């Protein structure tokens, strides 16, 4: 039922956007009988522009591979997508994030698999398969939050509310020398500008609040579908890589924060201590050091995750509740054997195909650090 209401709300959002555009265009082009109609039309066009549908785009700074560039990696992704029952991907991009996901780009909504190399570096081969299956399973058509109709409306609302958000106010007005020439006029102009800024912020408060509230409503309505998609993705992960590998991949999510901190520390070390006292380590060595750090972390008794990185279970529940429930489901469910296993030759081919992206992302990490 909530999915039906979500489709209705998304349809209303698209209709409002189209209505704002058509009305604004009519008032702007045909409304010159009065002084105010063209200005009202421009205002409506601006609101329609803020709420416009935004097709996804590939990250121009992320290394990108197509099937011709990495046939072994795409063969693995295609087999995993077939087991998960979802459409195959058209491209793969690599990031320094500890995550994997599927995004859509272009008007034809092609699919791109976004692979975080830190997660790939710390995982065993079967855990990598499990992580791929989990990400692909979350992008199933049953997840209406990620669909073309509701997902486009949600992204439009989020981007629109950000485009009309309140700017950062100045802490104090600029200090003006009272004996300077034109000091009074400058002070009066500054005060008038501040007053107009406050009035414009009050005018933007209404559309900003409406857009944000509608986005939160859509998130709430699509929460059950998103939660079911998580459970189905876990089931697909167990079928593809085995229940044990799926469970290990899910538990490894708690390594995300610690691995990010270690990557940032290594980036600072390279720019300071290493540069000052010894030759810089190779970029390829970054992933081996991250892998060794993850091995040490697994040997410790790490606490269960909680916070914004864990998925939410639904209205009124916490993300750690869903995480715990997902763990319990995999433990209690019938244990599945691995449908996909990677031998030494396949692993070697994939590693060779990822050689350039690994080096590029490592260079970005050591140059820019990691956002924590």
Image: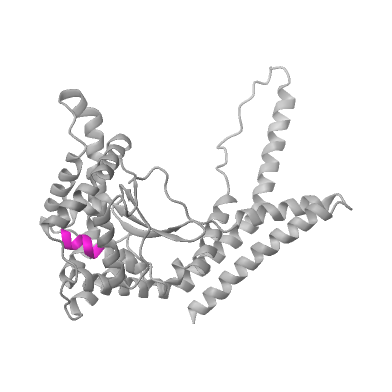
List x then y, in percent, for residue 223.
43, 72
Query: Is residue 165 visible from the viewing direction of this image?
Result: no
Residue 128 highlighted magenta (yes or no): yes
Residue closer to the observer: 106 or 300: 106
In this image, 371 relative to 182: left or right? left
Q: Residue at x 26, y 54 (%)?
A: 256
Q: Quadrant of residue 231?
A: bottom left
**Residue 274 point in image, percent of width and height:** 18, 29
Q: Is residue 132 something one can see in this rendering?
A: yes
Between residue 216 and residue 169, name the one nearer to us. 216
The prevailing secondary structure element of the residues shown in magenta is helix
Q: Which residues are magenta?
A: 125-131
Q: Is residue 367 placed above or below 255 in the rendered structure?
A: above
> What colour scheme has been applied to the protein in the rendered image?
one colour
- Total marks shown come to 0
Q: Position of residue 197 (x, y in %)?
A: 66, 43
| x, y percent for residue 26 | 78, 58
Lateral position of residue 57 relative to residue 368, left or right: right
User: In the displayed structure, does residue 52 sit left or right of residue 76?
Assistant: right
Residue lying farthest to the front in this orientation: 68
Name the residue: 35% across, 68% down. Answer: 138
Apparent side of residue 317 relative to residue 126 in the rendered image (left or right): right
Q: Nearer the viewer, residue 245 or 257?
A: 245
Say above or below: 195 vs 24: above
Kindly indicate the quadrant of the structure image that contains residue 253: bottom left
Look at the image and say whether residue 28 sits in the magenta stretch: no
Residue 182 in which image quadrant: top right
Q: Nearer the viewer, residue 292 or 204?
A: 292
């Amino acid at each position: 039922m909530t999915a039906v209401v979500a489709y209705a709300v998304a349809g209303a959002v698209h209709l409002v956007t189209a209505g704002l555009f058509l009305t604004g265009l009519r008032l702007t082009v045909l409304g010159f009988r009065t002084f105010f109609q063209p200005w009202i039309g421009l205002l409506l066009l601006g609101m329609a522009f803020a709420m416009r549908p935004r097709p996804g785009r590939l990250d121009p700074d992320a290394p990108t591979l197509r099937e011709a560039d990495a046939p072994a990696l795409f063969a693995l992704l295609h087999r995993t997508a077939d087991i998960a029952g979802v459409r195959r991907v058209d491209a793969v991009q690599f990031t320094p994030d500890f995550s994997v996901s599927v995004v859509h780009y272009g008007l034809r909504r092609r699919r791109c698999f976004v692979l975080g190399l830190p997660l790939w570096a710390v995982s065993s081969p079967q855990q990598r398969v499990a992580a791929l299956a989990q990400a692909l399973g979350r992008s199933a058509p049953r997840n209406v939050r990620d669909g073309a109709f509701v997902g486009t409306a949600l992204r439009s609302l989020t981007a629109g509310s950000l485009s009309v958000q309140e700017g950062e106010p100045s802490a104090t007005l600029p200090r003006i020398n009272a004996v300077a020439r034109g000091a009074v006029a400058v002070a009066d102009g500054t005060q008038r500008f501040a007053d107009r800024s406050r009035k414009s912020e009050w005018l933007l408060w209404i559309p900003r609040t409406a857009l944000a509230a509608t986005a939160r409503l859509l998130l709430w309505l699509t929460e059950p579908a998103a939660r079911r998609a998580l459970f189905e993705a876990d089931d697909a992960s167990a079928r593809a890589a085995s229940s044990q590998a799926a469970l290990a991949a899910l538990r490894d999510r708690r390594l995300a924060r610690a691995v990010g901190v270690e990557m940032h520390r290594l980036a600072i070390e390279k720019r300071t201590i290493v540069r000052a006292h010894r030759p810089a380590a190779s970029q390829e060595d970054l992933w081996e050091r991250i892998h060794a750090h993850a091995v040490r972390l697994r040997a410790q008794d790490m606490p269960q995750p909680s916070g914004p990185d864990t998925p939410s279970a639904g209205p009124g529940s916490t993300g750690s509740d869903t995480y715990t429930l997902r763990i319990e489901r995999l433990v209690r469910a019938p244990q599945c054997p691995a449908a996909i296993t990677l031998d030494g030759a396949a692993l070697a081919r994939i590693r060779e195909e990822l050689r350039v992206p690994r080096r590029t992302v490592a260079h970005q990490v050591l140059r820019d650090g990691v956002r924590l």
